[in-house]
Amino acid sequence: MFNVAGAPEEVKQFSGISRPESWGRWSNAQLGSDVKIEYKEPLPEKFDLVITAKAYGPNANKPIPVRVGESEQVLTLANDVTTTTLHFDNPSRSNTLTITPPDPQSTNEGNILGHSPRQLGIGMVEIKVVKSEG
């Protein structure tokens, strides 16, 4: 999902996310302190959010708030890619997912020559919405 240019089909727009790289995309606090993903359709009333991601530097093992509407869950990532499932109740049928990396770090790691440093927090490989039954 995150290693290609542009937004996936089901996504209306996103912000706080850097350019695509071979493995996925970093959050970039220079583009917004939160990662915001706005979907074209309202998200289900109950769903699982399956996040495949990693943390940059000191963002590892720190609580990362993930919000949909009024519901908030906490994600914890390591420096290596892991997959985590968070369960959400979304009675207001919000269409926006917000992830707030705790400690973005200014770095030129993996950057394009001549570009200013990015503020990396989390590296996203895939984020899937899976509707819950019941």
Image (spheres, rainbow, N blue to C red):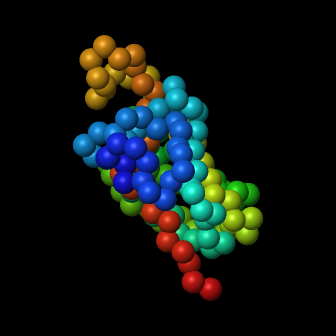
Name the foreground residue: 114 vs 41: 41
The image quarter containing residue 57 is top left
Residue at horizontal 40%, vertical 19%? 117
Is 96 placed above or below 28 here? below
Residue at horizontal 49%, vertical 71%? 130
Specify whether residue 55 is in view.
no
**Left-right relation of 73 to 8:** right
Residue at horizontal 50%, vertical 66%? 129
> Where is residue 2 drawn, in percent x and y?
37, 48
**Left-right relation of 21 to 59:** left
**Left-right relation of 26 to 37:** left
Name the foreground residue: 109 vs 77: 109
Residue at horizontal 54%, vertical 50%? 12
The image quarter containing residue 58 is top left
> Where is residue 25 drawn, in percent x and y?
37, 42
Quadrant (top left/top right/bottom left/bottom right) for the N terminus? bottom left
